[in-house]
Image (spheres, rainbow, N blue to C red):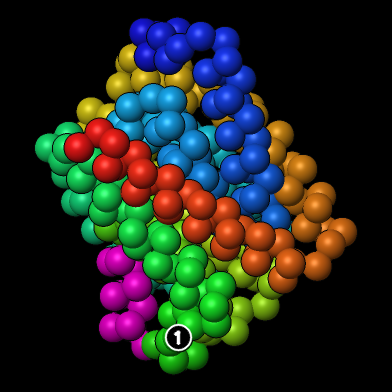
């Protein structure tokens, strides 16, 4: 319980809950970026390993909701369609997660920050990742491995997944569902991986549980917004959030070197 009660004064709690609600709203609108926003925001007021622990259970809960929004049968169909991506990504994620205890905090932030920043900038200026509509098993496995590295080290595996789905021309509703399925199964793997790595332990589980209700509130608001407004505008807004998050991660990494 120590990590739960000792993250800081009341304003730190208010800031952390605000970050989590905003992250859930972004996820509810475009289907991804919640771990990215949470990691960037929470690591401003707590150690990166605590921020990573805090996002694990909220990520699992919100992804399960997103995956099952159209029912179990649709979710299972998505699992079958993207099985190569899921298997490769899950294996690589478990392996990459074991690096977290030995990586210096600055190294973790400076690895993720530039990649997030470059992805957001390139997409905003119309030069994002472009893949063949039919990648085949090898291409899907490569994207799964990249997503696994992101997820294992930081809990963020959105950018490569979104790139793959966009390249395939996936329809909006299915893309949201598929992201929920992929991230949800990834979040399950992340829980197991970081129990093994020591990031998720008796002292940090209450912190992660405490961040789950505001995350669920945020994604509920985001779902309502997505149902009412055009997704393209919100996706562009999310890219700006990703850009800010990436720059903040770089700033934090430089400050604690």
As for residue 149 lying within the magenta part, the answer is no
Please tell me whether residue 104 is drawn above or below residue 239 in the rendered image: above
| Quarter of the figure with residue 236 | bottom right
Number of other residues with Cα within 10 Å of mark 1, as a class: few under 14, some 14 to 19, many 20 or more: few
**Would residue 237 be visible to someone looking at this image?**
yes
Badge 1 is on which residue? Answer: 130
Magenta segment: 136-146
Please tell me whether residue 29 is drawn above or below residue 188 in the rendered image: below
Please tell me whether residue 111 is drawn above or below residue 168 in the rendered image: above
Q: Residue at x 33, y 83 (%)?
A: 139
Q: Residue at x 52, y 45 (%)?
A: 37
Residue 217 locus on image (x, y percent) = 71, 34
Q: Residue at x 41, y 59 (%)?
A: 116
Residue 231 locus on image (x, y percent) = 74, 67
Of 166 and 87, which appears nearest the observer?
Answer: 166
With 159 as the anchor, is 70 left or right in this view? right
């Amino acid at each position: 319980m120590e990590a739960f009660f000792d993250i800081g004064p009341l304003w730190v709690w208010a800031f952390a809950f605000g970050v989590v609600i905003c992250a859930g709203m972004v996820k509810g609108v475009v289907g991804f970026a919640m771990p990215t926003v949470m990691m960037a925001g929470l690591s401003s007021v707590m150690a990166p390993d605590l921020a990573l622990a805090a996002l694990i259970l909220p990520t699992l809960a919100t992804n399960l909701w997103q995956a099952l929004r159209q029912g179990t049968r649709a979710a299972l169909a998505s699992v079958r369609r993207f099985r190569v991506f899921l298997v490769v990504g899950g294996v690589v994620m478990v392996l990459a997660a074991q690096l977290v205890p030995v990586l210096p905090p600055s190294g973790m932030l400076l690895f993720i920050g530039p990649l997030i920043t470059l992805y957001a900038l390139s997409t905003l200026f119309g030069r994002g990742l472009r893949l063949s509509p039919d990648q085949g098993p090898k291409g899907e496995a490569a994207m799964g491995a990249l997503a696994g590295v992101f997820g294992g080290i930081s809990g963020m595996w959105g950018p490569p997944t979104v790139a793959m789905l966009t390249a395939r021309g996936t329809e909006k509703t299915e893309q949201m569902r598929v992201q929920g399925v992929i991230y949800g199964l990834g979040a399950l793997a992340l829980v197991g991986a970081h129990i093994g790595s020591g990031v998720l332990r008796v002292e940090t589980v209450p912190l992660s549980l405490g961040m789950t209700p505001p995350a669920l509130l945020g994604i509920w608001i985001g779902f309502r917004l997505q149902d009412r407004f055009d997704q393209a505008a919100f996706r562009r807004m999310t890219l700006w959030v990703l850009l800010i998050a990436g720059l903040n991660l770089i700033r934090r990494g430089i400050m604690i070197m």
